[in-house]
Image (cartoon, rainbow, N blue to C red):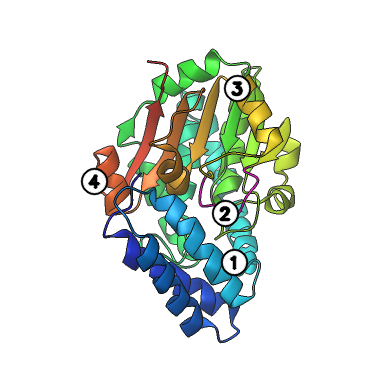
Amino acid sequence: MKCCADCGPCLMKRILFQARLAGNGTEFAAVKNAMGLYSELMSEDICSADIASKVHALAYRTMGCEDPYLQMKIDADKVAEEYLAEAERFVDSAEDRFSAAVRVCIIGNIMDFGSGIAIDSPDDFGKMFDDLLEQGIGFDQIEELRKLVESSDTVLYAFDNCGEDVFDKILIREIRSMGKRVVGVVRGKAILNDVTYEDAVRVGLDKELDRIVSTGDFAIGFPENIKDDGLNEELSKAGVLITKGMANYESLSDYTLSVPVVFLLRAKCAPVARSIGVPVGTNVVKVKDWRI
């Protein structure tokens, strides 16, 4: 997805939010440096995620903090665990377990802190859980997703936010119950509140998956050039790549991969919603199959 005018203010809100999380008095310098670089890079021809990755890298260096979201990620996991049993009951009582598991894993995508377009604290999630579960899927290509999974021996599953990954376990279990090998994809380095290998192990995802690989870099979503050997190896085996969240959509929606990609997300901002063709706040299952 290409950069647009809305991206700048959103990105700067995030920079300020995370600098305050760092708590070391670098707010002004982080925003100043980020604004300067963003003004140089801003272009309607460049992927929004690629620009954001470069700007965040500079902000992190300015803050001198490798993972300002760490405690918030831990808190999000704890809050999500409180609702996991209820989510599991929802799936157990459904006529279509696969569809219900997709629905459950998407509601966790609201755990997107600091942009002003979702929630700013893990504690806010509990107030919204039941309503989110009842909303259903507004852009629904679950049947296409199901067919892709059924025809695949290996399914790649790219995570997004901590907390959200607790609910991803439910869909991963459903896919594995279909006899599929499931490989998780995490961020190569700590960025925002996204899942790294250490975060995945903390919530037990290593016990739910056949393998974990990473994007291999400090990047919003997937880097423009995937250099990680493990990820490239698994891409060559996979029949489908399931990705969670807007960052993965922004980074992959315009790229051509050898494998079909399925985007599971909540369209929390106007640019992403416009790109997909849905109202803001819509839960989305969108298939992108470059073979067709």
Q: Which residue is mark 2?
A: 194
Say above or below: 148 vs 124: above
Q: Residues within 10 Å of mark 2 (few under 14, many from 20)?
A: many
Closest to the camera, between mark 4 and mark 2, is 2
Q: Amino acid at mark 4?
A: Pro
Q: Residue at x 60, y 47 (%)?
A: 166
35 on left or right of 203? left
Quadrant housing the C terminus: top left
Residue 4 locus on image (x, y percent):
28, 54
Q: Which residue is mark 3?
A: 238
Q: Residue furthest front?
A: 40
Residue 152 colored in magenta in the image:
no
- Which stretch appears magenta? 215-221
Say above or below: 260 vs 162: above
Q: Residue at x 60, y 71 (%)?
A: 61
Q: Residues within 10 Å of mark 3 (few under 14, many from 20)?
A: many
Q: Residues within 10 Å of mark 1 (few under 14, many from 20)?
A: many
Q: Residue furthest bottom?
A: 25
Gap between marks 1 and 4 measured at Cα = 29 Å
Q: Residues within 10 Å of mark 4 (few under 14, many from 20)?
A: some
Quadrant housing the N terminus: top left
Residue 114 locus on image (x, y percent):
45, 67
Q: Earlier in the sequence, mark 4 or mark 2?
A: 2
